[in-house]
């Protein structure tokens, strides 16, 4: 018996069965500081550099991804929050005259970004009284707005919670990437994450998305204990999910280059020097996993 609460051996997604084009990929872990935003930002750049049309959506009220894309919003500027609220007819009295084209920004990399704002932290409360299916607000919005047909990939950065924002993201998602720190707490955390994926199926709002990769991050190769933790976690993932679904990628080590590029709001691809080549290769690998993953319902 492994550590996961619910086995997800056959979790090929049909969560977004009606979508004709874009694949929605989210970076998820309820813990903060594991590298979600960093991985999301650099993987999006890798995909864009390989020619894909990419939209990034920042679903974290802390707006760290928006910041990396140089999309800091002023107090009166609107965000993904307003688009979601506007998509709910019952909330007409708080609708704002906001059009998606005014909110989407195009970054010099060619990546489009739908920024977040602090208001997003009030999303759960704002929609608490509506009779619309609350977990499906984002999914329905991506379809109704047509955004899903305009991009090859929609890459979503999640907040460090497992609340309604994350449930909305998961319901809209085809493939989940799970960055984690291989420490003694991560087994319990991953178990909790998988139980939320199981809850989604039980809510009757569709099948849970497929976890396409687990990404060990912030490894310190001088610490033997981390190596052992990672081996133990990988082993249990294989035991619980099966070899085919456990996909644990090569670990990302604690690298000053990632701190520096993030601080300068740049991706690792913006640097020519040799010291960035290893990271560029790793993010290209993540992009390949996203591109080549079998999402089950797309044939
Ligand atoms: N492999 C790494 N090496 C060094 N610093 C990293 C690495 N991954 C992430 N970081 C840094 O750790 C901090 C937290 O990462 P972040 O992506 O914001 O995590 P999360 O979104 O999960 O909270 C950031 O300052 C980021 O630059
Ligand atoms: Mg983050």
Image (cartoon, rainbow, N blue to C red):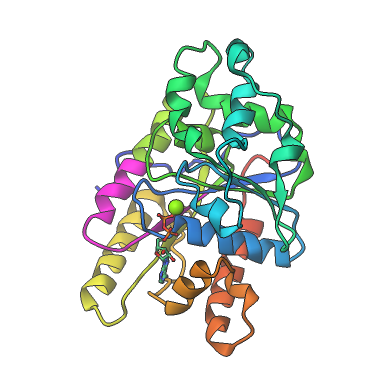
Q: Residue furthest bottom?
A: 274
Q: Quadrant of residue 144?
A: top right
If the picture is divided into quarters, which one holds ligand 1? bottom left
Name the residue located 55 percent from the left edge and 38 percent from the top edge: 75
Tell me, yes or no, if residue 14 can be seen here: no
Q: Is residue 104 left or right of residue 161?
A: right
Residue reaching furthest front?
Answer: 75
Residue at position x 60%, y 37% from top? Answer: 79
Give above or below for 250 relative to 61: below
Give the left or right position of residue 221, taking residue 280 as reference.
Answer: left
Q: Nearer the viewer, residue 8 or 41?
A: 41
Where does the C terminus fall, quadrant-wise?
A: top right
Q: Residue 50, how many percent across, how many down? A: 73, 66
Q: Is residue 188 visible?
A: yes
Residue 93 percent coordinates (x, y): 60, 12
In this view, the residue in front, 278 or 260, is 260
Total numbered labels placed on residues in the image: 0
On screen, 127 above or below 221? above
Q: Is residue 180 magenta?
A: yes
Picture coordinates of residue 182, whole percent (x, y): 30, 63
The x and y percentages for residue 264 are: 54, 70
7 part of magenta stretch: no
Q: Is residue 109 above or below residue 67?
A: below
| Residue 138 versus residue 257 in the image, above or below | above
Q: Nearer the viewer, residue 202 or 140?
A: 140
Q: Which residues are magenta?
A: 176-193
Write the residue at 33% across / 49% down.
190
């Amino acid at each position: 018996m492994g550590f996961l609460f619910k086995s997800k051996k056959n979790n090929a997604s049909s969560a977004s069965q009606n979508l004709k084009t874009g694949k929605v990929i989210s970076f998820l872990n309820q813990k903060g500081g594991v590298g979600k935003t960093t991985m999301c930002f650099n993987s999006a750049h890798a995909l864009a550099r390989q020619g894909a049309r990419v939209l990034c959506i920042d679903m974290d009220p802390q707006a760290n991804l928006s910041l990396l894309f140089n999309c800091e919003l002023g107090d009166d500027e609107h965000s993904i929050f307003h688009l979601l609220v506007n998509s709910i007819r019952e909330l007409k009295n708080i609708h704002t005259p906001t059009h998606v084209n005014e909110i989407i920004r195009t970054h010099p990399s060619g990546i489009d970004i739908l920024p977040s704002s602090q208001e997003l932290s009030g999303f759960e409360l704002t929609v608490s009284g509506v009779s619309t299916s609350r977990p499906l607000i984002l999914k329905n919005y991506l379809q109704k707005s047509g955004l899903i047909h305009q991009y090859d990939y929609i890459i979503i950065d999640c907040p460090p919670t497992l609340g309604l924002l994350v449930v909305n993201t998961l319901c809209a998602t085809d493939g989940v990437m799970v960055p984690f720190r291989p420490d003694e707490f991560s087994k319990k955390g991953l178990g909790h994450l998988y139980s939320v994926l199981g809850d989604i199926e039980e809510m009757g709002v569709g099948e849970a998305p497929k976890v396409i990769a687990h990404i060990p991050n912030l490894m310190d190769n001088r610490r033997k204990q981390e190596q052992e933790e990672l081996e133990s976690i990988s082993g249990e993932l294989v035991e619980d999910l099966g070899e085919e679904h456990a996909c644990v990628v090569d670990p990302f080590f604690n690298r000053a280059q990632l701190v520096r590029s993030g601080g300068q709001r740049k991706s690792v691809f913006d640097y020519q020097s040799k010291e960035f080549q290893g990271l560029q290769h790793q993010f290209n690998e993540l992009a390949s996993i996203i591109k080549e993953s079998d999402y089950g319902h797309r044939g």
